Amino acid sequence: MVESGQRSSVVEFGFSNPDRPRLGLEVVDLARLAGRLPASTLSTVHRTDFHQLFLITGGRGSLMVDFVDHVCEPGTLVSVCPGRVLRLPRATDGPLEALMVLFTDTFPQRLAAVRPLLSPFSQVAWTVPPEERPALTGAVRELMAEYHRAVDEPVTIALLRQLLGALLLRIARLPSDGPPAAHEDTYAKFQHDLERDFATTRNANDYAARVGYSLRSLNRACQAATGRSAKALIDARVALEAKRLLVHTDLPASAIASRLGFTEPTNFGKFFQRETGASPGAFRDRERISADDAPPE
């Protein structure tokens, strides 16, 4: 990882492999990665332009993705797609051990079965079933072994792509929190339209019309996928973007309100308070205090 810019207390990372600069893949354990990063960076919220997989193999801790803390213990798998904000795992009970696979969006094979896993709407965390853990851990370790002994020539790069593809296919078949097949297409269309237009409209009827279904059908698909209505998901996406802007930029709340389609800053403040339980200013201050509490370099 390489720091590409910083606003306020948030670090932006672009992909950079210090050992093999021309390769869009790195396989590393958490301890080694932590050893080459400033101690302060380990505790700050940041965003990357590449995919990250964390397979927890020892200890206990937590990992924050898009302001949700995920418990990390042996058998936990976390996938972070480009654009999501995260804080690297923090140990809470002894040293935390994890295998990490970092890769650019263009490195993996184009496999239809893993496309949902690599999308911005993918599931973030899994508890890998005990019977699946040996094979999944073995797939990561095989990829790591080949990564460390391979040279950058076409045949070995092709092998790395194959091994990464096999790992991603194993993850894709894990039990998912996704929607039942009957609602998958409807929900997927809604997700894509929401990602494109959340700053333009927060009206659930608008999205129902765009995906070509009644609001009742859209709500049924959303409930099957997430247990929440379309309107609740729309509001959650807007609130998430507001959190990202509050943490990643120094924009005043009034400018963030305008960017997210609110005509009045007061309406944005009420919306954010309702969705998060905190005012925009209090949320920003809390996240920056958390960053300031990082251990010194």
Image (tube, rainbow, N blue to C red):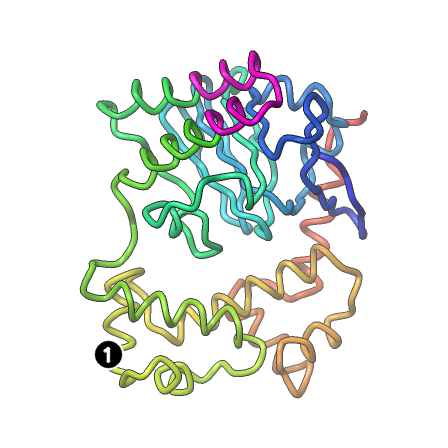
Indicate left or right for 152 with 189 as reference: right
> Which residue corresponds to the image point at 41% horizontal and 33% vertical from the top-left?
77
Which residue is at a point 31% across and 31% down the rendered structure image? 128
Taking depth in this image into account, of 167 and 96 the one nearest to the observer is: 167
Badge 1 marks a residue whose secondary structure is: helix
34 sits left or right of 29 in the view? right
Quarter of image, res 238: bottom right
Vertically, is 168 above or below 55? below
Residue under label 1, please give it: 217
Left or right, residue 204 beside residue 202:
left
Taking depth in this image into account, of 281 and 10 the one nearest to the observer is 10
Is the stretch drawn in magenta largely helix, strand or loop?
Answer: helix
Inspect the image, locate mark 1, and give the three-letter code of the amino acid beneath it: Ser
- Residue 217's image quarter? bottom left
Question: Which span is picked out in magenta?
Answer: 141-160
Q: Nearer the viewer, residue 236 or 192?
A: 192
Percent x, y of residue 190 = 38, 72
Mark 1 is surrounded, within 10 Å at the Cα level, by few (under 14), some (14 to 19) or many (20 or more) other residues, namely some
Above-or-below relation of 12 to 217: above
Which quarter of the rendered picture does the C terminus lie within? Answer: top right
